Image: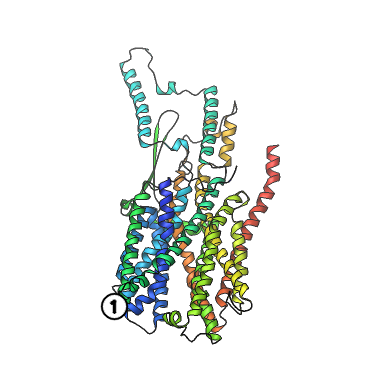
Amino acid sequence: MASRIFPKLTASGLQATTYLLGIALFSISFLVFLNSSISFVVTDVIGQKKHVGDAVGTLGFADELLALVACPLWGMLSDRIGVRTVAVIGYCIIGVSLIGLVQSENVYPELLVGRLGFSLGGAACSTMVTACLPAMVAQKPEQENRQAPEEQGLANGHAARLREEERQGRSSSIGHVTSPSVSSELTITQNRWTSRSRSRQEDREENDQADGVGVDGTQTAAGASQLAGFVGLFTGAGALIALLLFLPLPAKFQHDGQKPAQAVQTSFYIVGAIAFCVAIFIFLGLRHLPGEEEKSFSALWNTPYDERTEMDAQGNVHITLTPAPSYLSLVSESIRLGFTDSSIALGYIGGFVARASSVGISLFIPLFVNAYFVRNGLCTSNPDNLTDIKRNCQRAYTLAAALTGIAETAALICAPIFGWLGSTVVKGRSEWPLLGAAVIGVAGYTAFGFLKNPNAFHGEGGKWAFIAVIAIGISQIGSIVCSLGLLSRGINNGTMSKKRGPSDRKRDSASSRPGYVGPIEGDETAALLPTAGEGSDPNSARSRLKGTIAGIYSLSGGAGILLLTKLGGTLFDSWTPGAPFFLLAIFNGILFIAVAAVGGGSALLRRQARPHTHSDNE
């Protein structure tokens, strides 16, 4: 089967478009705009000319601290009220914060409060990028569980009518007059059971083919990897939107005659209004998202229940109500999966490396370049003053922007490639592209840390800077795309394994043979009704955890950022300017070891299982 350019989705075209052009595209745009322009709020709007670097650094650190806590909370909340609602709230908070930031008259507490508000909204939006992805490619429920409420009502009504007719016939019968019964109509003979079993097996196989899902959910996992590649592409495009459209706004308004402070304020007003427009777009476009139909604000104060209605062969209706897990159990289960499920574990580690890599590109490459210019007497700017660097060390600022742009361009180009690779090699375990990204990261960060001359356009050794930043960009987007794909695969495959595994298919095949009596149908000691575990809703497994898992994923990424910024910054001053990049190489090395251990262990287990499978077939 030829691989598809765009994955097969469970969600509608409008929902997928909203996800990519709304949540994914703008999840990073507003953050890039704020990080690049916050210094101008301090200098031009507030009027503080000294200790600008310290103020900006403190605001950024407070932002990350709050996001570290907010991401898991938003994820848990989305499992109750839905990802669409959380995303809309997040972008509305961003819009309010951007408008409020430029009303500040001092850094502490007014600007700090505004930045924390932005962090709260940004955490919601970035977490929903991860939480929405599994819903886009999730396997649809099996056909027997797909009855609409109206169809279930008709079926229930038919069974009730038959039972009522039976009672009326018995009450009005005289002597030995026969009356119809539900049981006699549903008597199961050998031929009828064999025919029904074959029909049920054929229906299930047709449903699997229609949904594009194999025994192990291969095509669903492939679709998740492909879609993750497009998510990486659109998030990168969002950063370019901020650089090309949002950041030039203050200069444009200032050129039109506005004062610097007024130009910055007008720019923030416009970008804040865009955030509100994105929220409206998501509110309209993500309605009726698969798996989100039952989520609402009422779940915050009412104990939600999972309801499942089944009808047995005699027409009896069984309704099972199971209390939804608490917030604490959602978190504990999501953390536990990081130790018991290899896909989710690698997703968490990949998220840790990916977020740390993004800071390495945006923060430490400019810092490395500026330190080189200052060290060699090519620049007289104060490295602690960001505004001074831009004005008095234009060469260093231009080179840093060029290197960062090269890295981000390489990432933008390679995002769909990693998505395609994940979908292509998924039968041979889709973690292998993440292994390649880790190898490239170790090489790229190590090479950049040892650079004597970061000028990729002049001087000896400049070509190595060019190659190193390309490798860094490829490694960063590979970690992002592959970790998202693995996380979605862990969520969807975990749910599908609850639906029907290979053993279920083996039983279906065996039950279609004449003379076969299953363990439940023929065993006198078997229970008449399935146990709670056997009858549980398959969609109540990991699909209910996707928001919390996304929150833990963002939490691990935030931890990577904090560790890199504090430890890397300290080693930058006390040891060598290449220390942050060596630290990132170590992170990628740990990721390499984890992927190799998981992939190699899985390959060994599959190889050992082949002789047993062969002997069983014989």
- Which percent across, then down, holds residue 81? 35, 53
**Position of 25 relative to 161 (above/below):** below
**Which of the 4 quarters of the picture holds residue 205?**
top right
Indicate the quadrant containing the C terminus: top left, top right, bottom left or bottom right: top right
Foreground: 528 or 291?
291
Residue 359 percent coordinates (x, y): 49, 70
Counting from the top left corner in percent of width and height, residue 218 is at: 57, 46
The residue closer to the viewer here, 480 or 285, is 285
Q: In this rendering, is residue 487 above or below 372?
A: above
The amino acid at mark 1 is: Glu
- Percent of width and height locating residue 369: 53, 78
Q: Quadrant of the N terminus?
A: top right
Residue under the image location 70 percent in, 41 percent down: 614
Q: Is residue 296 visible?
A: yes
Q: For mark 1, what is the residue?
A: 105
Identify the coloring: rainbow
Q: Residues within 10 Å of mark 1 (few under 14, many from 20)?
A: some
